[in-house]
Amino acid sequence: MNFDFSDEQKFLRSEARKFLESAWPAARARGVVDDAAQSHDADMWRALAEQGWLGIAIPEPFGGLGLSRIDLCVIAEELGRVLAPVPFASTLYFLAEAVMLAGTADQQADILPRIVAGELIGAFASSEGPGVPTPATLRTTVSGGKLTGVKLPVTDGGIADLCVVLASEDGKPGLFLVDLNGPGVSRETLKTLDPSRGAARIAFTDAPATPLGAPGAGFDLAEQLLDRAAVLLAFEQVGLSDRCLEMARDFALERYAFGRVIGSYQAIKHKLADMYINNTLARSNAYYGAWALGTGAAELPVAAAAARVSACHAAAYAARENIQTHGGIGYTWESDCHLYYRRARQLGLVAGASIAWKERLVGRLEQRNAA
């Protein structure tokens, strides 16, 4: 069991970091935040497609690079460092993974090449408001191939072309593919804390829907999909957390107060040390999740939940303490600190809130121990 990246993956990470920090620094996210008409950075999205990153873990027969999901984790971490304002997670972690997990041969042949080419933006719609959807609370229904209901919030739902929707058919939950540019779909933009990633309320009224996976297996498939996404999102959160620590460290070593750099004071040292400990724990759990995801290990449900919980905590803590370390400057609009805080909070809700994952982790550990 190897919990570190290989030399090839470390080289990929180094080259990806050079490319992103030179061409697409975190300040690019500010362009989307400051412009309400922009929902994402379309130029960056095209650049990622040209780099081949949209197909990094998609098999070669569908136009992808055919690399592993651990390679995708490497890219996810670097995108998290620069606050990439693109629908990478919605399209790759959810739509592509759902199609590879449960799609038919025809669905895979139709959808995956378009994702690789950057021609298709995806989304995942399971939430219908506050709380975790359950078979008893699921109100979105499918009848005769037509889907009706309301989903919110749907991350990147305002710009997505194709959506994976959790809905009930004949009383049984299932996953369905819905063309968001087709009939029976209306979208309303929602305001969130992180405007660099859009969200929408989507209303379906007899919208044509195509089954994805076996009938009645919706919640089981959704759980598998969320486990995969949780690991990949954890790497975005680890990248964000590490960048926050670097920002706080650099500022602490250049800012003077009472004749000394503020990094020499015990209070600042404690903040940086706690950020480092949280980040290291989150990285360790993310590596465990990546190993489980990459090998198809039976531990994936536990590893994914552990990665999700620790990454949510590390990102929220690092983003908050980064602002605190910067003092009054950290609270200004001109500082990038708030961009990281906004993204940390947003990532903490995509794929479900941390508290729900804590309950899921405890439940899975109890099941494992009882077996």
Image (tube, rainbow, N blue to C red):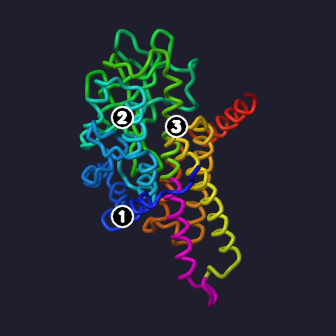
Q: Which numbered dot is residue 15?
A: 1
Residue sitting at x 31%, y 25% = 105
Secondary structure, mark 3, is: loop
Main secondary structure of the magenta stretch: helix
Q: Nearer the viewer, residue 333 or 243?
A: 243
The residue where tag 3 is placed is 296
Q: Is residue 16 left or right of residue 3?
A: left
Query: Which residue appears at 67% of the width and 74% of the height?
Result: 269
Where's residue 9, x and y in %?
43, 57
User: Along the line of sight, which residue is nearer the eye, 309 or 347?
Assistant: 309
Lower position in the chain sequence, tag 2 or tag 3: 2
Disc 1 element: helix
Rendered view: 97 above or below 343 = above
- Mark 2 — residue? 188
Image: magenta residue range: 237-261
Q: Tell us which disc is closer to us: 1 or 2.
A: 1
Query: Percent position (x, y) of residue 126?
Result: 47, 29
Dots 2, 3 in contact, CB < 8 A: no
Give the alpha-carbon distance from disc 3 to disc 1, as whole Å.
27 Å
Question: Quick check: is 371 in the magenta stretch?
Answer: no
